[in-house]
Image: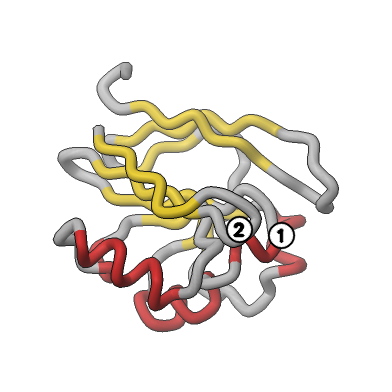
Amino acid sequence: MKVSVLSSGSKGNTTYIETDNAKILIDIGNTSKYVKEKLEGFGVDPASLDAILITHTHVDHIKGLKVFENKYHVPVYITKIMHKSLDYIDNYVYIDGDFDIKDIHVDVIKTSHDTPDSRGYVVSNNGK
């Protein structure tokens, strides 16, 4: 499994994770253009992503989401409560417990934050 933090901090949070069979982002707190350029720098076509997992709806975690999702149609994993703030997202999957995206297993953790809802993710592949 490859993990690349594209940015971390108050100006934006975006993490890219890749396995043999799956490619995901956790958050997209940078512009769509920034994320596209970073992914292409790794040789990754943004349209090849399997999912975007959102931790919470603060702007430093969702800044590029609307433009990126509209352009590349990547499924966005959110809770029902998050969707109230992200009602412009049409291609979504509601998070209701742990789940798999191809060969990535995601354990979902309820987190405490000053937002209506937030989640943390523990990502594993082949037990690692």
Q: Is residue 9 above or below residue 38?
A: above
In percent of width and height, residue 120 lies at 61, 36
Whether pointer 1 and pointer 2 mark residues with C-beta atoms closer than 8 Å, the reply is yes
Relative side of 44 to 65, left or right: left
Query: Label 2: which residue?
Result: 61
| Three-letter amino acid code at the position of disc 1 | His
Q: Quadrant of the N terminus?
A: top left
Image quarter where the C terminus lies is: top left
Hey, what amino acid is under mark 2? His
Q: Residue 45 vs residue 69: left or right?
A: left
| Residue under the image location 29 percent in, 42 percent down | 102
In this rendered view, identify the residue nearer to me: 99 or 123: 123
SS at badge 1:
loop
Image height of 39 relative to 108, above or below: below
Would you call the spot at circle 2 few (<14 residues within 10 Å), some (14-19), or many (20 or more)? many
Label 1 crowd bin: few (<14), some (14–19), many (20+), radius 10 Å? some
Q: Secondary structure at mark 2?
A: helix
What label does residue 58 carry, if any? 1
43 sits left or right of 10 in the view: left
Looking at the picture, how far across and down is residue 35, in whole percent?
Answer: 38, 67
Measured as percent of width and height from the top left, residue 38 is found at 30, 63
